[in-house]
Image: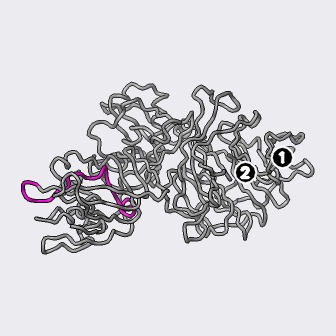
Amino acid sequence: MAGGGSARAAGLRAGAVAGGLALLVAGCASMPDHGEIRQVKASHGTDSQVRVFGVPPAENASPSDIVDGFVEAMTADDPQLETARKYLTDEAAKNWRPSSGVTVTSGGLTWVSVQGEKDPDGPRFKLSGKKLATVDERSAYQPHTAGGTYDEYLQLVKGKDGQWRIATPPNGLVLSESDFQRIFKPVNKYYFAGSTLVADPVYVRQRTDPETRMDPMAQTVKSLLAGPSKWLGPVVTSSFPSGTELREGTKSLTYDSQNGQNTLRVPLNDKADNVAQPQCQKMAAQLFYTARDLTASRLDRVELLRSDKSALCGVAEATASTTAGRTTGTRYQYYVDNDAKLVRMELHTESELQDRANAVPGPLNTTPGFRVGAAAVAYDEKRAAVVSEDGHALHVVSLTTAGQMPVPVLTSRANKLTAPSWDPRGDLWVADQDPAAPALWLVRGGVAKPEKVEVAGLDGGRISALRVAPDGVRIALLVVKDGRKNLHIGRIERPESRPDGPGTAAGTVSVRELRAAAPQMADVTAMSWAPRGRLLVVGRESGGVVQARYMLSDGSMVAASLPGATGLTAIAASDDENKPVVAHSVDDGIVWLPPGAQWRTVAAGGKAPVYPG
């Protein structure tokens, strides 16, 4: 039997209604009255309140209907995905592991009957689709950008009862993009790099997981305890002892409110029973930021419980912030004015935004004739790295003491240095776009001899812009290749023997495992790191207009976009969510977007806005 079909079958859907009641409503198609399941189009929209309940196979269902019904049932919310397993042979149902991962396809799936090679008498179907991404067993999202296809073969056999069933189901789940967004949601879990917490984005179920029966909070904490994603793992650590899990039987984690505080209590197994208080405080800090990012309601405190449910330790927000190395001490926002001078504006409350920029102190603006093209300010705001307007020289200057303009720390023969970027260690990064010798350079402490950094995976591309993340272990790179600018994120790897601190020795630093950070964008104009490990990206989708939107660092799109953000050529965000987004607009100059407000022009001219970093 030959033919094809869409990846949806009839189903019943339950929509949540006021008062916590659920109504079963007709789904994609009406129930058949003649023993067959009619094929229908893939679902549209991403309403997370819609619940899908699969329809079990009909008596004497055709092989094509078995495939159709199974693909639909993979989107269901029933416990253990029981309905989907009814389309499988007994052995296949027992061995199928939906939790082993998810393949996300762009649009639905199609299938065609092909001649079986091992069992020519049994129907065999080739399941195909355009692969958009995969989610691995640790819930980490990995986009596919090379136009890859998904192909899987489903072998059907006839049981003793005369019913067709699938003997070779796919590994994990296969979902269309719309179904994936309806079923799963992105969350951050947090791990330490030195004394700094790093956001590790993963996807968990919007509601109770059909296999573990855990609610979203418990799913996320389980993922946190299991360890970081494979991509981030080489550069971060977890404070939880190996083997730490939620206390057996824990399916739900919810806040309770006492004395006006929202407290999350997390019971652990005996692996964590005897940890020392400093380590426990770090464990609690990881949990605090992980839980805080998962909910819109305020979280005041996290408490860890031993296996006997006695108190292990707890942290409130202030303690968690200190333990995690979180600081919000940024005082100024910087940009280059119309006279090619580096200037700064003091950050006040929204109602008291400074309306006038002042030249930065130090030798930079007292040296006659020196013109700034781009700049980066160290996190302590005591030094600035500036590239001359002609792109030839990189200087590091003091912002606290007067003196002579220092000699360049790096020059470009082709006058093509990018804007620089500081990392939290006090090291400086810059790229040279010289076509004859493109390179990424690291200046340790901002004073050492520049070192060339190996970047694995550029494949002939050239770095045109860069920004090191506030966590110091990731770097965003705009890479020009074949006339397009694409955004990638790389993992910064330093030798384990290197002491922590600015300007210290030694060993080669490299950037590994570049991955697409904005695969949906046909072209990227500008980017900045933003709070909670996100990226703020200016670019356009294929056939679309230039816009600014937030994206997760794993390359999956976050829906939030900036209102009215057109005509932007540069953008900067602080790691502090209370600070305004700042950008350069072709029409309006330097503009600010304070939290919860509208864009406002703060300088008619200027370019290259930056926050420290």
Instruction: Pick the residue in front: 57 or 276.
Output: 57
Does residue 208 show up?
A: yes
Report the side of 90 relative to 234 (left or right). left
Does residue 418 show up?
A: no
Kindly identify the amino acid type of the residue bearing the numbered disc 2.
Answer: Pro
- Give me the residue at 54% from left, 53% from top: 517
Q: Is residue 602 above or below residue 426?
A: below
Kindly identify the amino acid type of the residue bearing the numbered disc 1.
Answer: Pro
In percent of width and height, residue 564 lies at: 61, 70
Report the side of 144 relative to 483 (left or right). left
- Determine if the magenta segment contains residue 166: yes
In percent of width and height, residue 324 lies at: 54, 38
- Determine if the magenta segment contains residue 266: no
Q: What range of the chain is rendered magenta?
A: 159-181
> Which tag, 1 or 2, sits closer to the chain's start?
1
Question: Which mark, by number, is residue 176?
Answer: none
- Closer mark to the observer between disc 1 and disc 2: 2
Looking at this view, name the residue that lies furthest to the right.
368
In percent of width and height, residue 22 lies at: 25, 65
Question: Which mark, by number, is residue 361?
Answer: 1
Q: Is residue 341 above or below residue 60?
A: above
Instruction: Pick the residue in front: 336 or 82.
Output: 82
Q: CA distance from mark 1 to mark 2?
A: 35 Å
- Give me the residue at 45% from left, 37% from top: 284
| Crowd around label 2: few <14 · some 14–19 · many ≥20 (10 Å) | few
Q: Circle 2 sits on which residue?
A: 435
Instruction: Identify the secondary structure beneath mark 1.
Output: loop
Q: Quadrant of residue 301?
A: top left
Report the side of 353 relative to 117 (left or right). right
| Crowd around label 1: few <14 · some 14–19 · many ≥20 (10 Å) | some
Looking at this view, name the residue that lies furthest to the left.
161
Instruction: Identify the secondary structure beneath mark 2.
Output: loop
